[in-house]
Image (tube, rainbow, N blue to C red):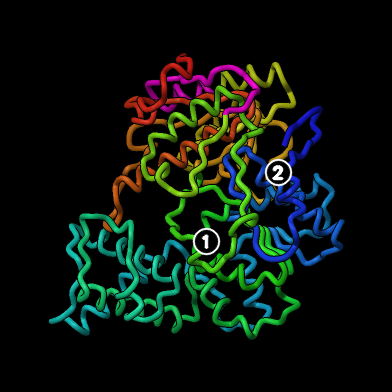
Amino acid sequence: MKTKNNKISITDIQKKCIEFQPKGSLLVNGIPGSGKTTILIERARYLQQKKMEKNILLLAYNRSMTSYLQQLATKSGINDLEVDTFHSWGMNILRSINYPRTYVLPTEDKFGTVRFARNIVRKQNSKSFSLPKFETDRNEISFLSQEIDWMKGLNINTVEKYYETSRSGRGSDIRVTKKNKKWIFEVFSKFNALLYSNRQIDFPDVAIILYEKAKEIPKELLPDHVLIDEAQDLSAMQLIVLAEFAQKSLTIGADKAQQIYKNRFSWKNLGIDIRGTRTKVLGQTFRSTKEIVQLANRFQQQDEILVKDDEYIEPTLPNRSGPKPTVILSKTYGEEIEKVIKKVKSIRANDKNATIGIICVKNDKIDAFVEALNEQGIPNVIVNELGADLMSPGVKLTTYFSAKGLEFDHVFVTNLRKNAMPKLKVFPGEEEKEVLSTERKKFYVAMTRAKLSLTITGVNPLSEFIDSLDKRLYKLE
């Protein structure tokens, strides 16, 4: 995808993806900025306008990305394209078939319900109940919650299947015996029973229920063509459902280097045929400058887990050059905000049409930037807000988690402070190296949102990620 005078020029391999036969599966495996999102939008146009297909579903993994895709589709002149998240789309189908339980357990109530389930099982079986040892009750509940999500993500619905299924990424400090598994599954079953009695479901249940009710769903409710952006962050069960429900074709945009949720799977094990020409690899970026990609690549290559993955793609450096990325160090968060706003003002003075992304670790850090921007009279938009305009010039604020899939002319990756980014809080059942790998991916994703300039800001005590950056590839301010 080359851009000239704001017009998109499609490369040969992108065109092959867009015009790939509208039957069966296609995997578009591409690095950040390689055009995966553009391919999905243009493939939707191709199917709609050239093949006269109407029933097309484009899925993203969160609401901010859904909003962005919808705005891209509208800007591209694509009408009546259904753009949604998996959960929203799935819940709409369940309501359409009058499924009796469509109230989803609020995330903030999950721990309490798991604890209640654990307490019931433990009380009823006080002499034999056994779980792995944890330092605190909260750690035990956190472990059980993660184990429940993992089981549901793979549709493990019998204790025998639980015994048989290997569990990677649980952490070397947690030893789970067969006896432990028996009682974990009892807690899992009681948790589900509590939801059922309250006419509730859990978020991961949406995929399971759709799978179980597949024969009851009228064909007219199912999409002919499904296109998925950032598919690596969907669960195995969600992808199985989408592959089965797509009546004609399934197009998957994915990049393991940007996988920020703990969903492990292989396409083969999911029953998705992407052999041979059904996989297209995009190793060239058209978004960022050579200087930005160099810095991001060098940092990414320190992730031992990622580089050993069979689907890892080492990005090719682009020809387009620009200024070296900048690293700014501050003593406090307040000083960091002042320095960022000073540079934002400079960018806006030189280019009123520029898009500027400020990426923060948490919403409270976004709020601090918003307050300061408002005081300076600088218009701004929070990406996650309903109806946020993500395409127009100006300042956009987002978290690391919500930045994926977006792009801005100028990017400020902020809050690089010890214990903030990376946030190495390792819960029971997690491997520290895997938590670090996920944090690395979040930082890599944030850096690769930048098209023209990248500024990274650190706050004392500095994040270890600042030390991991190649000093030859940035300038220090």
Residue 374 can be seen in this image: no
Image-based side of 244 in relation to 392, left or right = left
Identity of the residue drawn at 19% across and 60% down: 134
Q: Which residue lies furthest to the left in this view?
A: 127
Q: In the rendered image, is residue 442 in sight?
A: yes
Q: Residue 282 vs residue 331: left or right?
A: right
Q: Residue at x 63, y 49 (%)?
A: 280
Residue 179's place in the image compared with 85, above or below, is: below
Q: Name the residue under label 1.
A: 267
Pointer 2 residue: 13
Measuring from the top left, give residue 421's x and y in whole percent.
39, 36
Is 326 one of the magenta-colored residues? yes
Badge 2: how crowded within 10 Å, few (<14), some, or many (20+)?
few
Q: Looking at the image, is 271 positioned above or below residue 412?
A: below
Q: In which quarter of the image is residue 454?
A: top right
Provide residue 75's location: percent of width, then percent of height. Answer: 80, 44
The amino acid at mark 1 is Trp
Q: Is 459 positioned to the left or the right of 376 in the image?
A: left
Q: Does the magenta stretch include residue 275?
A: no
Quadrant containing the N terminus in the rendered view: top right
Q: Which of 195 and 280 is in front in this view?
A: 280
Q: What element carries label 2?
A: helix
Q: Residue at x 27, y 55 (%)?
A: 171
Magenta residue span: 317-340
**Distance of label 2 from label 1 (alpha carbons):** 21 Å
Q: Where in the figure is residue 335, as x and y percent of width and height?
A: 44, 21
Q: Residue 351 carries which label?
A: none
Q: Quadrant of residue 371?
A: top right
